[in-house]
Image (tube, rainbow, N blue to C red):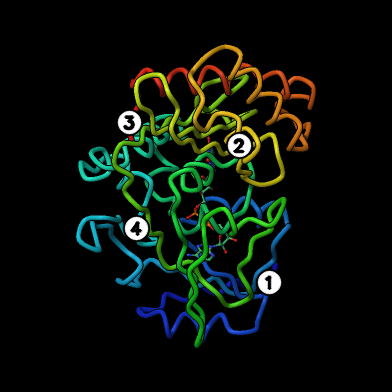
Amino acid sequence: MPALELAEPDSLDEAFALLADDDAVRPMGGGTALMLMMKAQLFRPAKLVSLRRIASLAGFALIEGGTHIRIGAMTTFSQLEHSELIAEHLPVVTQTMKTLANVRVRNVASVGGNLAHGDPHLDLPPVWSALGASIRIEGAGVERIIAAEDLFLGYYETALAQGELITDILVPLRPGWRFFYAKVTTRAEHDWPALGLCVGVHAQGSTIENVSLVLSAAVDKPTRLTGAEDVLRGAELSDAALEAAADAALAEVHIESDGRGSAAYKRQLLRVHLARAVRHVMQGSASA
Ligand SMILES: Cc1cc2nc3c(=O)[nH]c(=O)nc-3n(C[C@H](O)[C@H](O)[C@H](O)COP(=O)(O)OP(=O)(O)OC[C@H]3O[C@@H](n4cnc5c(N)ncnc54)[C@H](O)[C@@H]3O)c2cc1C
């Protein structure tokens, strides 16, 4: 078996130099996805570059006068799960953590590694998209910020180029909005979802003034349901409006079959859970 080197740079510049133009060198966050991919021989890196010593990738805080939260790429899921700041300002993230994997994974898995992995079944990416988050990507001489939904190009495919790293996520706080992530599993509640749906609403009484709907797990990448959003935006909450939104959603996406359900089953899940999740969030039992 070929030797595997581990590098642990202290700075981003050092990491960029190690990663430059060599696809046998891979960055490592918590290593939870990477190790599985290596065991399955999907990746055979010669060197791993651990990001855990890079101080600028750690931590999270309110920024820009309290209008956004910046989350460093090496923040672990457990740190988010147990944070009062996150519970107060982004309770949908706290809610999502409760059924994401298990405590051993949450203790080491990182926000950046989770995004870069590009698996459409992951629970957090649709949440970041629905919240309107942006992702900062950096490389040697490169810095760009893209919308979370633009990071995903397809099944395990992202907009990251060789040598680029996700360095942080910028999440806007959206006063008056309420969000809820529906994780629909067919076995245990901590299992991988057959369908994931993050719903955000800004409502006045029973009028849906604005809405954000992002579907995952049943599609090849987290996907905004713009047609369904258009149906619901400005509508009174009603069975008819929810039926019309589900029709629009089903017309605009290609639902995929996988080990957790056939496409026909997932289409039915989308119809049922879109209505349930919108009703749930309209009742105010979830908040942004
Ligand atoms: C037993 C088990 C159960 C799970 N259940 C769930 C579940 O229910 N729901 C769910 O959503 N997820 C689940 N997961 C997946 C888990 O969320 C991911 O494995 C994890 O988020 C990946 O993060 P990481 O930091 O460990 O990434 P790593 O494994 O370190 O990296 C993943 C990929 O991203 C790259 N990378 C890492 N960091 C960066 C960076 N900052 N910039 C650019 N590229 C980077 C790596 O090179 C690799 O390609 C489960 C995983 C396991 C092992």
From the top left corner, tell me how far across and down residue 40 is, in percent. Answer: 71, 51
From the top left corner, tell me how far across and down residue 45 is, in percent. Answer: 65, 70
From the top left corner, tell me how far across and down residue 78 is, in percent. Answer: 33, 44
- Return the disc, 4 or 3, that comes first in the chain's sequence: 4
From the top left corner, tell me how far across and down residue 200 is, in percent. Answer: 44, 34
Neighbours of disc 4 within 10 Å: few (<14), some (14-19), many (20+): many
- Return the disc, 3 or 2, that comes first in the chain's sequence: 2
- Return the disc, 1 or 3, that comes first in the chain's sequence: 1
The quadrant the C terminus occupies is: top left
- Cα separation between marks 1 and 4: 36 Å
Q: Mark 1, mark 3: which one is toward the viewer?
A: 3
Q: Which residue is mark 4?
A: 71
Answer yes or no: disc 1 within 8 Å of ligand 1. Answer: no
Amino acid type at mark 3: Ser
Q: Which residue is mark 1?
A: 2
Neighbours of disc 2 within 10 Å: few (<14), some (14-19), many (20+): many
Location of residue 280 by image quarter: top left
Q: Tag 4, which secondary structure?
A: strand
Q: Which residue is mark 3?
A: 287
Q: Mark 4, mark 3: which one is toward the viewer?
A: 3
Q: Which mark is residue 215?
A: 2
Q: Tag 2, which secondary structure?
A: strand
